């Protein structure tokens, strides 16, 4: 009789615990007050050794995790919209998601990605969208630059963002407009001193070595993300390995007049058959970038569309395109948009302006790793000019354009499923 009573008591306690068990749901549809900080909250939950469910295509790519008072308190502090639901309610959501007819899936986030941002220690007179959004979302990152990369620090990290860098060694091709500015002259002095200290005769040679080291990081399983000019100049530097197409004002000597014909497109991640812009006074690297005069767009009509992928069959591009909007405002940069005809056929296009023949957001694999290229400078500043104040993301907490960056931040945390297409 006593044993039976104890058994009934235990069963009752278990039922009570199950009734009390609950799940926190962070919706990522239009009901969310702060989409950007929600990513930071998901990252923070992971640091507390709690698994996060990323509900792909469910209410804009919502997050869910087991309820705990300290976790809920953090959401309140960060000003994030959330609801606490019973586990029975959550199981109902999971059943809905698992329906073969539903274009939804659950991606388990388990690992805390260690993040590095490639950026100079002395900031140039412009900001970087990734560091802005990481800071706003309260996601920690380390700054690395040429010295750390050549020292072999990259294997410490899961994810690397390339600052809007010029990997060709032409200092952004700002010579014509800014060569008399103190910041430009200081940039050149620092770059030349760094190259010499690291054993290279020229900055272009150092940048080439950096690009190849990053390539090896990606090949080993690293996650690479680049924006603006760090996209096309990265591939140009890969294709031009061993070539000198840089003019004297940038590297002190002449260039190979036949460099164009010697480019090796098999070495690039994304682009093929592009032509270099050899004029050292022209503010452009190649014909990869769509030019303003041929685009004919203004802030009022510059948009691109995100693709919709199968969550159950193509989880990687599905993760990278999670959003509460499918139409994204366009924005300019030194590299504003990728010419579609120069993108390799195996690249996964995730966002494009089809009418203009330009790609804005794309993804690919390299050996064991992956890369994502996102064109433009600042998703909430259409034409960000040198010297302008950084964007205040507190004014744009629901930015669809910035969400694409943060999708890439959480992507390395996912327990990978094999892509089926």
Image (tube, helix red, strand yellow):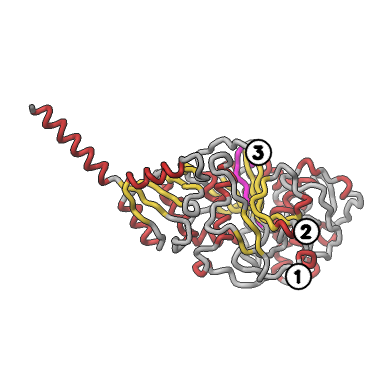
Magenta-span inclusion, residue 220: yes
Which callout, 1 or 3, points at the residue further toward the start of the chain? 1
Tell how many labels: 3
Relative side of 366 to 61, left or right: right
Residues tagged 1 and 3 counted as in contact (Cβ below 8 A): no
Mark 2 vs mark 3: in front: 3
Q: How far is the residue under mark 2 from the one under mark 1? A: 13 Å
Left or right, residue 249 beside residue 157: right
Query: To which quarter of the image does residue 187 belong?
Result: bottom right
Mark 3, residue position: 219
Decide: is 220 above or below 70.
above
Residue 114 is situated, as x and y percent measured from the top left of the image, at 52, 47
In the rendered image, the residue lying farthest to the front is 101
The residue that label 2 is drawn on is: 170
Who comes first in sequence, dot 2 or dot 1? 2
**Cα distance in 3D space between marks 2 and 3:** 27 Å
Q: Which residue is mark 1?
A: 178
> Which percent across, then down, holds residue 42?
44, 51
Quadrant of the image occupied by residue 355 = bottom right
Q: Position of residue 90 (x, y in %)?
A: 37, 46
Can residue 165 be seen by looking at this rendering?
no
**Quarter of the image where the C terminus is located:** top right
Q: Residues within 10 Å of mark 3 (few under 14, many from 20)?
A: some
> Residue placed farthest to the left in the image?
1
The residue sitting at 52% across, 67% down in the picture is 396
- At 56% from the left edge and 42% from the top edge, which residue is drawn? 315
The answer to whether residue 102 is magenta is no
* Image depth: mark 1 or mark 3 in front: 3
- Tag 1 secondary structure: helix
């Amino acid at each position: 009789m006593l044993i039976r009573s104890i058994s009934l008591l235990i069963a009752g306690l278990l039922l009570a615990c199950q009734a009390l068990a609950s799940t926190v749901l962070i919706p990522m549809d239009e009901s969310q007050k702060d989409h950007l900080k929600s990513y930071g909250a998901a990252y923070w939950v992971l640091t507390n050794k709690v698994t996060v469910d990323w509900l792909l295509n469910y209410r804009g790519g919502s997050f869910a995790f087991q309820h705990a008072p300290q976790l809920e308190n953090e959401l309140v502090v960060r000003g994030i919209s959330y609801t606490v639901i019973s586990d029975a309610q959550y199981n109902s959501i999971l059943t809905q998601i698992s329906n073969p007819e539903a274009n939804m899936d659950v991606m388990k986030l388990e690992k805390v990605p260690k993040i590095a941002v490639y950026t100079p220690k002395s900031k140039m007179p412009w900001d970087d969208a990734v560091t802005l959004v990481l800071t706003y979302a309260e996601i920690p990152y380390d700054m690395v630059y040429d010295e750390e990369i050549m020292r072999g620090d990259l294997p410490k990290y899961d994810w690397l963002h390339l600052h809007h860098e010029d990997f060709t060694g032409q200092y952004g091709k700002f010579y014509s407009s800014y060569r008399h500015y103190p910041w430009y002259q200081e940039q050149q002095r620092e770059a030349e001193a760094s190259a010499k200290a690291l054993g290279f005769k020229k900055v272009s040679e150092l940048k080439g070595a950096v690009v190849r080291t990053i390539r090896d990081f990606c090949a080993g399983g690293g996650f690479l993300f680049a924006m603006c000019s760090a996209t096309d100049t990265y591939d140009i530097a890969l294709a031009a390995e061993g070539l000198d197409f840089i003019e004297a004002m940038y590297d002190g000597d002449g260039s190979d007049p036949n460099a164009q014909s010697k480019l090796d497109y098999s070495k690039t991640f994304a682009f093929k058959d592009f032509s270099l812009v050899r004029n050292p006074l022209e503010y452009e690297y190649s014909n990869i970038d769509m030019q303003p005069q041929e685009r004919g767009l203004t802030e009022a009509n510059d948009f691109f569309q995100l693709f919709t992928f199968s969550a159950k069959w193509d989880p990687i591009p599905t993760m990278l395109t999670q959003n509460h909007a499918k139409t994204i405002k366009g924005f300019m940069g030194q590299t504003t948009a990728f010419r579609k005809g120069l993108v390799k056929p195996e690249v996964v296009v995730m966002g494009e302006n089809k009418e203009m023949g330009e790609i804005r957001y794309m993804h690919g694999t390299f050996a064991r790793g992956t890369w994502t290229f996102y064109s433009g400078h600042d998703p909430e500043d259409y034409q960000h000019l040198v010297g302008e104040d950084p964007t205040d993301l507190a004014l744009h907490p629901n930015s669809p354009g910035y969400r694409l960056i943060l999708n890439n931040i959480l992507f390395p945390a996912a327990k990978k499923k094999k892509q089926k297409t």
